[in-house]
Amino acid sequence: MRTKLAPPWITYINELQALFDNDPQIAFNIADNGRSVTIACNNGDKCAALAQLLPAELVYGNVTVSIAIDGPMSNRAFLSNKELFETAFWKNPVLAYCVAPKQEGYDWIDCTYVVFKNCVVQFFNDNLDDCHGVVSTLYQDIAKDVFVGNDLVGVFFNTDINNKVGAPLGEWP
């Protein structure tokens, strides 16, 4: 029986990979026992979006993890959080869509819903609650962990609904 647990920085890297492993434009290079992560991408806009969304470093006690984006960096200024996430997840099949609803008369409400594919995500992480050692979760939960330390006020991570889910008693718009 395993009794060794994955340290929190390895969990972060596992979540980061789960979120972007299916993206055909991204490749990972993990070095120094998980203390250095390089995300390679050849799309300048995507690189700029990822650089804005991901922290350059994370500190876990006496361990510092550096995250670098390797590729051309465009000077694109993103006009909204919706545009930022759509660019970061362009061609990544885990994203269902982004929506930034505007409500007339409520200009102060500026929110963006980043909606991920409706599926269970699994990755190995020395999880003692699971006989296989895997974590089973949703992309929305991973995104909440991965996009930490940023000023993402009004950004909400969601999972797309399945067709069987309906409005409660048909009364919600």
Image: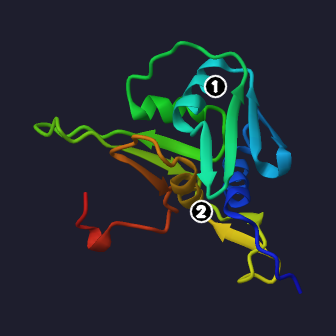
> Quadrant of residue 15 in the image?
bottom right
Q: Secondary structure at mark 2?
A: loop
Q: Nearer the viewer, residue 135 or 4?
A: 4
Q: Position of residue 94 (x, y in %)?
A: 64, 47
Name the residue: 52% across, 31% down: 52
Looking at the picture, which amino acid does disc 1 mark? Cys
Using the image, tell me which numbered label, if any, was put on residue 147: none
- Inspect this view and state whether residue 85 appears: yes
Disc 2 and disc 1: Cα gap in Å? 24 Å
Q: Position of residue 88 (x, y in %)?
A: 58, 33
Q: Nearer the viewer, residue 129 or 157?
A: 129
Residue underneath mark 2: 138
Looking at the picture, which amino acid does disc 2 mark? Leu
Q: Secondary structure at mark 1?
A: helix
> Quadrant of residue 48 in the image?
top right
Q: Quadrant of the N terminus?
A: bottom right
